[in-house]
Image (cartoon, rainbow, N blue to C red):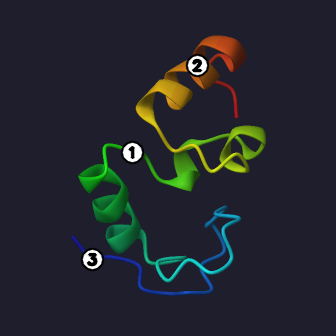
Amino acid sequence: MECSNDPKAVGCNCSYEPCSRKGRCCECLHYHRRNGELPACFFHESYERTYDRSLENFQNMVKKMGMRR
């Protein structure tokens, strides 16, 4: 698998500006999974801005919003 390593990646919705992994999808995914979390791209904008990347927050979002994005 080839991983994006573009810090200016258009699809990255992470709003945490000092993040060193922004646009580096593989690094971001590995970092958050090691911490029992999901990366920003899994979350709707309103949930992403809370910086709560927990699986519980993701489940709450899916229940509340359904699968629409």
The residue drawn where x is 56% and y is 77% is 19
Q: Quadrant of residue 64?
A: top right
Image x and y of residue 45, in percent = 75, 46
Which label was assigned to residue 20? none
User: Which residue has dot 3 on it?
Assistant: 2
Up-down: is 61 above or below 5?
A: above
Where residue 31 sits: x, y (%)? Answer: 32, 63
Picture residue at 68% right of the left edge, 77% below the top = 17
Q: Which residue is mark 2?
A: 60
Which callout, 2 or 1, points at the residue further toward the start of the chain? Answer: 1
Q: Is residue 26 above or below residue 40?
A: below
The amino acid pointed to by label 3 is Glu
Neighbours of disc 2 within 10 Å: few (<14), some (14-19), many (20+): few
Say which element carries label 2: helix
CA gap between label 2 and label 3 equals 32 Å
Please give the name of the residue rendered at 51% of the width and 44% of the height, measured from the top-left corner. 53
Residue labelled with disc 1: 37
Task: Specify few, some or many for label 1: CA neighbours under 10 Å numbering under 14, 14-19, or 20 or more.
Answer: some
